[in-house]
Image (cartoon, rainbow, N blue to C red):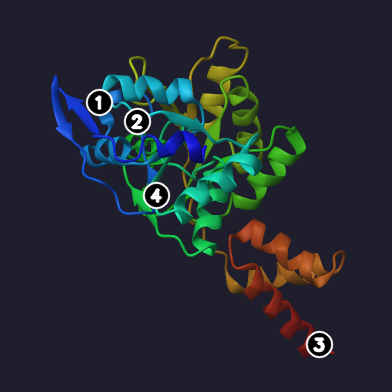
Amino acid sequence: MSDETSSDVGKARAYRLHNVAIPARPLEPALYLVATPIGNLGDITLRALETLAGADVLACEDTRVTRVLLDRYGINVRPYAYHEYNADEVGPKLLQALAGGRSVALVSDAGTPLVSDPGYRLAVQAIEAGFRVVPIPGASAPLAALVGSGLPNDAFLFAGFLPVKDKARRDRLAEVGAVPATLIFFESPHRIAATLKAAADVLGPTRKASVCRELTKTFEEFRRGTLTDLADHYEGVDNVKGEIVLLVAPPEEAVTPEADVEAMLIDLSKTMPTAKAAAEAARITGLSKRDLYQRLLEMKGRHE
């Protein structure tokens, strides 16, 4: 990579808007994490275009996908593939380019790098090696879905992809189900029906949710309702297409009386170890597991 990219350094770089070529200023040596459109190519930022055009080295998940974006804006830079299957080989070469005083831009196929993609490893390695890491903000599927979902957005938890296997998926939903925030997941179209059914079973049938599909694209869709409504809609549908973001509303606030909490802890501790009893009480009430554990220890101390 170093020999090939050395011939590119120093070339005049530019990007094109409405058939007007705009020169790109040279970039300082750093790893630039560049957000790219999640569907609509018009969602690219001017700063991102200038960074892509001005970088000495451009790394991406799939060169074919990135080439479409580069061609759209007249950017004559050769992209190099960096993905989970070649990270061990290509990562050190990108770090070597940084060590040589070059600028390296990293993009994912769509959206913001490091969000559910292998770029995280490279960013950590660059930081540990003392190189500057510069985020170039832009499109983000989780945020686009959140603002269009109609669900509370004052607090949210992005939880990435859920496990493929049903038990692991349900366990993960149980872990995050009591978090007082809107939950955001990525999901594939052929698993969305099973995920909605599991979510309705674990989180409750009346909990509000939104399935956001093909964001920013021609057939963008926001389907809103309870988890049961959505599960019923997708049950038996085998032609779901496109990329999906699933959002689930925070749990309804329910205040559990202190006496009820203590009674629950005592009852659970009769059949479970202290830590497990506290964890189960936390799952049921939404209260802090640590606080419940400490409370149970104090209760046991009083009765000894």
Q: Nearer the viewer, mark 1 or mark 3?
A: 1
Q: Are marks 2 and 1 in contact (CB under 8 Å)?
A: yes
Q: Nearer the viewer, mark 4 or mark 1?
A: 4
Residue position marked by numbered label 4 in the rendering: 102
Q: Are marks 4 and 1 in contact (CB under 8 Å)?
A: no
Residue position marked by numbered label 3 in the rendering: 303
* Residue at the image position 70 percent from the left and 40 percent from the top: 170
Q: As drawn, which residue projects farthest toward the right?
A: 271
Amino acid carrying label 3: it is His
Q: Earlier in the sequence, mark 4 or mark 1?
A: 1
* Residue at the image position 81 percent from the left and 87 percent from the top: 303
Q: Earlier in the sequence, mark 3 or mark 4?
A: 4
Residue position marked by numbered label 1 in the rendering: 42
Q: CA distance from mark 3 to mark 4?
A: 67 Å
Hey, which quadrant is residue 117 in on the image? top right
Hey, which quadrant is residue 280 in on the image? bottom right
Task: Return the residue nearer the eye: 37 or 165.
Answer: 37
- Other-residue count near label 2 (Cα within 10 Å), few / some / many at <14 / 14–19 / ≥20: many
